[in-house]
Image (cartoon, rainbow, N blue to C red):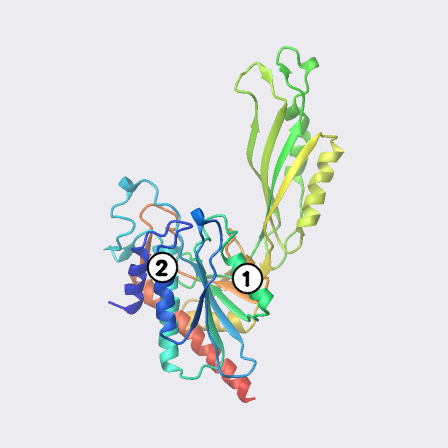
Amino acid sequence: MSQTLDLAEQLISRPSVTPEDAQCLSLIASRLNALGFASERMDHGPENARVSNLWAIKRSNQPDAKTLVFAGHTDVVPTGPLNQWLSDPFTPTHRDGKLFGRGASDMKTSLAAMVVAAEEFTQAESAASFNVAFLLTSDEEGPSVDGTVKVVQALKARGETLHWCIVGEPTSVHQIGDMVKNGRRGTLSGKLSVKGLQGHIAYPQLARNPIHLLAPALAELTAIEWDKGNAYFQPTGWQVSNIHAGTGANNVIPGEVVVEFNFRFSTESTAEGLMQGLEAVLKKHQLDYTIKWTLGGLPFITTPGDLLEVVQQSILEITGVKTELSTTGGTSDARFIAQICPQVIEFGPPNDSIHQINEFVRLSDIDSLKNIYLGILQRLQRLTHSAAGA
C-alpha cells in the first residue's frame, strides 16, 4: 500500500463530521513534527462546538525565505442515510478501482497527499530554500467562523507573511488536474422583510398585500445587469433562494413577506455597491422594509505568476493534462487566506462525488495527486534556490 493511500484511509476512518476533528489534526501534526515542523493548535469556539485548528511551519534557514502554505479541512459533511451507503462511510473500502468513504474526495485524500509530499520533499531536501506550512481546520463544512478565518487573523496580527497557498479542495472535473481554481466570486446574502397590512382576503381594500407590493420591485431586480464580469469572472448574479409569507390560512392576506437572496459577485462589483443598488430599487417602489445583510466572502483572483506556473507544469508532467483555470463554483476557505496571501489557488481530485452518498476517490488518482504536490515543492525549490543564488 502506498503511504498516501494508507494515510488517506486513516483519516477517512475517523468520523470527523463538522465541527468534529476526531483527532485527525493530531495524527497529521505528529507526522509533521517528525519532519521538524513547529506545530501549534489554535482552537476556537464554544466548548460544545469547539473547532480544531492547526498551524504548522518548517522554516528555511535562508534569510527572507518565502512561504508556501498547504491549506484544507479535516471536517466532513454528515453521511446522510446510512442504509443508502454500500459500505460504512467511515470504513475505507475499495470497489471498482475506487476508495469509498466520507471525505474521500472532500478532502482527506488531498490532506494525505500534501503530508506525504512534504515528507518526501523534506527527506530529499535537507536545506529547503523556502518555508513550508500547513493551515488546517475542522470548520470548513460548517459556519466557517472559528476555523481558518481565526487562524488568518492571528497570523496577520503576528505579521506572518505568506506568499503562496494551495487549498486542497476537489477542483478537478473529468480527470485529475483538468481544472484549478485561481479565484472565487464573492458571496453576499440578504434577508429582506417587506411590511404590509394583514386582513381578510375578501376585503383587500382594508389590507395591503406585501407580496403584491414587492412583486414589481422583484421583477426589476431580476432584470438588472449588475456588472459584465471580466476576463476571470462571469457577470455578477442575483438569485432568490426563499420566499415566506402567509399565516397558513388561505383567506388571510399576509402582513409581511420575507425574501432570502444571494449575490455571487465578481471583482467588477463591491459589496457596498450591490447593497446600495438593491436598496435603491426598494426605495424607488416605496416599500416599507428592513434588510439584514451577511457578507460571506470577498472575491479574489490569482493572476498568472510563479505559483500557477509551477502548478500547471507539475500537473502536465504527471498527468499530461493541460489545466483550465476557473473561478466558478461555491466558496472555500481560500477567501480568508487570500486576505493575507497574494497567490492562492485550489487544486485537488475530481469532485464528481463530493457530499454524495458513496463518496469516492479513484485509487489511481491518489498517488498522482501526491506526485503533483511533490512536483510543486520541487519546482519552488529550484525557483527560490535560483533566486537566492542570484
Q: Is residue 361 above or below residue 295?
A: below
Side (left or right) of 30 relative to 390: left
Examine the image and state in which quarter residue 33 appears: bottom left
123 or 137: nearer the viewer: 137
In the image, what residue occupies the spot 66% across and 55% down? 268
Kind of residue at badge 2: Cys
Q: Does residue 232 show up?
A: no
Rendered residue at 51%/84% (across/down): 62
Residue at numbered disc 2 = 24
Residue 313, percent from left and from top: 46, 73
Q: Position of residue 149 (x, y in %)?
A: 54, 57
Please provide percent x and percent y for residue 231: 61, 59
Using the image as rendered, state which of residue 5 and residue 372 is in the foreground. Answer: 5
Q: Position of residue 285 (x, y in %)?
A: 73, 31
Residue carrying label 1: 152
Q: Amino acid at mark 1?
A: Val
> Looking at the image, which residue sits at the far front?
47
Viewer-nearest residue: 225 or 210: 210
Q: First in sequence: mark 2 or mark 1?
A: 2
* Label 2: few (<14), some (14–19) or many (≥20) C-alpha neighbours in 10 Å: many
